[in-house]
Image (cartoon, coloured by chain):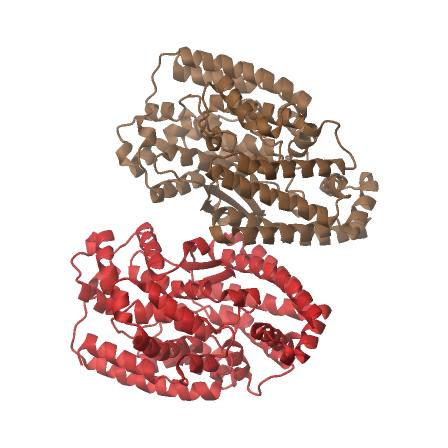
Chain colours: A red, B brown
Amino acid sequence: MNEKLKRLKEIMLIVKKYRHALGLLNFDFETIAPVKSQDEEADVINFFANELFKITNGDEMKSLIEDLYREKDEMIDLRDRSLIEKLHENLEKTKKFTPEFDFKLNQAYSDAYSSWLKAKGKADYSLFKGDFEKLLNLQEQAIALRENKFESLYDNYLNDCEKGVLQADLDRFFDELKQGLIALIGKINASDHKIRTDFLTRFVPVYKQEEFSKYLLTLNGYDFSKGALATTEHPFTSDIAENDARVTTHYYENSFVSNLFTIIHEGGHAIFMQNEPKEDHEHFINDYVTNGMHESVSRFYENVIGRSQAYIHLIYPKFIENFPEFADVSEREFYEGVNVVKPSLIRTEADEVTYGLHVVIRYEMEKAICNKQITLDEVPQKWNELYKKYLGVSVPDDAKGVLQDVHWSGGFGYFPSYALGNCYNAIYYKKMQKEIPVDELVRKGDLESIKEWLKQNVFAKANLLTPKEWLFDICGEDLSPKPFLDYLNAKYADIYKF
Amino acid sequence: MNEKLKRLKEIMLIVKKYRHALGLLNFDFETIAPVKSQDEEADVINFFANELFKITNGDEMKSLIEDLYREKDEMIDLRDRSLIEKLHENLEKTKKFTPEFDFKLNQAYSDAYSSWLKAKGKADYSLFKGDFEKLLNLQEQAIALRENKFESLYDNYLNDCEKGVLQADLDRFFDELKQGLIALIGKINASDHKIRTDFLTRFVPVYKQEEFSKYLLTLNGYDFSKGALATTEHPFTSDIAENDARVTTHYYENSFVSNLFTIIHEGGHAIFMQNEPKEDHEHFINDYVTNGMHESVSRFYENVIGRSQAYIHLIYPKFIENFPEFADVSEREFYEGVNVVKPSLIRTEADEVTYGLHVVIRYEMEKAICNKQITLDEVPQKWNELYKKYLGVSVPDDAKGVLQDVHWSGGFGYFPSYALGNCYNAIYYKKMQKEIPVDELVRKGDLESIKEWLKQNVFAKANLLTPKEWLFDICGEDLSPKPFLDYLNAKYADIYKF
């Protein structure tokens, strides 16, 4: 067994190099690559992804994984066993793929991305539909080739994104979340408290936003010696290597708040990446944090910390120093302004309360498509209906509607993780508050202690456990939207005075 | 033959993908990669460079190249034949390398680069010497393994950089150049004309320099849809793909002129890359422009155009509009200021006249090291002596002396190409002036016509011919520093009024 494990790890070192190169290529593609070379760069990405497939699904690797999997119970090192289990689980999904099929699937992702981009530019869903359909068909074929699979198509997607959190869980979860949010929005709408928002659209030049972004990232505990900040159309964080977690953002000169919370959000992802256990990297199991776990941390920094009174108190003096043109805005006005609740069209710009309903809509859409309750032709109309129903807004065009997010060009299943993330962090936030004086620490700028708590409680076993196991391990609780709804109700009762 | 050529081109398509990825990795390494991940990224680069070696020096490729080389005279397509000749020439150099030797050589480059960086940071040549020596020894071994080689070690380095321009040519060339420059500097020193330089060190914030850089690049004909602008410690231009030529620069807030001419220089390289014949890309022969040819174009834009009265006249109004704090500087003062001649320590910041002497020093150093006339221990002392002798300046430490340039961490032979570039462009500039009204075109901002002339005359055959053939093809002239010295004498007689 030891010889085999040794050989497997030699191959994993090569796999790591491919992932580094691919991570970088993808980062470049989304940030710096010039318009006219994007097709060529996409080809390069697909080529190397396929070369990597040939290694990870090659005969040697297959037999190493299968042999070691049979002997896994004898493994002493927990992380070695975990690596074998993870590799085996992935192999079960792809072992019947030919390299040609893998290439076709990657090509379908690129094509869907590229037509989504064009379609969004022209606000015309019909330009996306063809490649969207091709991708979904190919993904269905890919699932059909799996060794072990769920009966329901959507459960396969969900499980890929958030292991063990399936449609049955999510139906209950979203139902409770939806009722709670609608009730809260009702109270907010009934409030006659006026929130000042005029300053939110004041012009702030890009270079000043960039400077402030670097200050915020450093303040929150992001380490620039192991990362970088770049700009992109659709912000993301990129886990390129153990010492390289990069943050991206998008600056809008007439909406500095957009970048402010994007930076804190993406910085949260990056702080997670920079503080995963060193042993996880050494055992090649550092890529297994689920989307929901990741979003729990990014949205914790963005909302629970970033949009708190304590944090606004902390950054307000520096903000006014850097942007003296905002001196007429008081700390409280600033706090209320960045927390104003207003149903809107765009998920990424939504407030903390209505945000969940954007996710509910996507969940219902994905479920309906997967379960063949609506056709792809009906997608925009259904989307617009749901926005009217849940948020009361009319969608003017596909760019501000069904095409706003990139995610579907990569398939289904990601969106629920945003709502799950909010609920995970509301659960562990309760525990954090019992153990450390969060509010006081934030007020005095000790974000280091927050990071340390997350490191010990949240990051430590994230690569080892499924989301449900991990949540139970942290707080002994099961998944529920209740702590999140409680958190929102308390916060907004104070802001909207009900 | 057709079947073999077809197969060879299939492999070249894969080679192109590796080069794209490696180009990008190198670009990233020099621009964005965080400090703490550089070692890891260097390992990734060396890994993929070695994978590429295994393809280009693999058995299939070897026999394809050798078979096709024997049949090359029957090839109808000039570019196909050229490709085979070039691949064969490279193969003759590396066919006796094992993959392990290739890896060791690449590793030696990384190590030398990394210790150069540390040594420069601490201004201590002794920290570089060990890896420098290892690299030079390995390069000597590599040359010893060549199928065809020159008797003199230095000629091998020179020929690799500037095919066909060897020590015998350069001895004559630099001797004439040196005499001419020393005579000209004598005249300038004797002049009592005072040039205003106070404004050259005025503070200009990075973001304003960046904005102006984009304006200049676009003005000169650089196409941002096929490129990008980034920052780095040691500016370079990166030829990543047919539609991706990236410019880098370094902003000094107390020396805006540094970036001004870096941008025009690097933009020149990029304009060359963006305007190579499409057929060269299609035939995989687009990577064969020599350093000297490339520097001829970059230094043409930087100096012949960029530092001309006409160009300063063109950009002056926009400059004053963007930087109103310079309104007290007249157009003529600006022109003279950016052309002030002053012997100095740093090559990249030298004026057009003394620049050549910086190259002379490096040429004499490289020759003396290769011909074992000095030991590696004596390098800093010799360097400092030559700076005293030719430029009359005292070198305060190694960082401002022998460690200032990165080049030697990649071996010898590059430096002469800077001086050659100046002389090449002085030769074709004479022809250009006869054929189009350069001065008038620049004054009115028609840089497009300049680019078009270069495209038809300078870029068209650069991948197909050796430097001497190419120069003769453009203007029917042989290499000589005389036109360059004539150009300098006329320009500086006007500035220094002698």
Asked whether the viewer can see residue A474, the reply is yes
Whole-percent x, y for residue A480 in the image:
38, 85
Whole-percent x, y for residue B220 in the image:
46, 37
Out of B342 and A454, give the one closest to the viewer.
A454
Q: Give above or below for B482 relative to A156.
A: above
Residue extending farthest to the front is A76
**How many numbered marks are there?**
0
Whole-percent x, y for residue A291 in the image:
47, 73
Q: In which quarter of the image is residue A108?
A: bottom right
Q: Residue at x 79, y 51 (%)?
A: B59
Q: Is residue B497 left or right of residue B125?
A: left
Quadrant of the image containing the N terminus of chain A: bottom right
Out of A363 and A136, give the one closest to the viewer.
A363
Q: Which residue is drawn at 65% across and 43% down?
A: B280
Q: Give above or below for A356 relative to B288.
A: below
Q: Which residue is drawn at 26% across and 28% down?
A: B328
Quadrant of the image containing the C terminus of chain A: bottom left
Q: Quadrant of residue B188?
A: top left
Q: In which quarter of the image is residue B319?
A: top left
Whole-percent x, y for residue B49 in the image:
65, 50
Out of B23 and B49, give the one closest to the viewer.
B49
Q: Which residue is drawn at 33% across and 80% down?
A: A484
Q: Give above or below for B492 relative to A470.
A: above
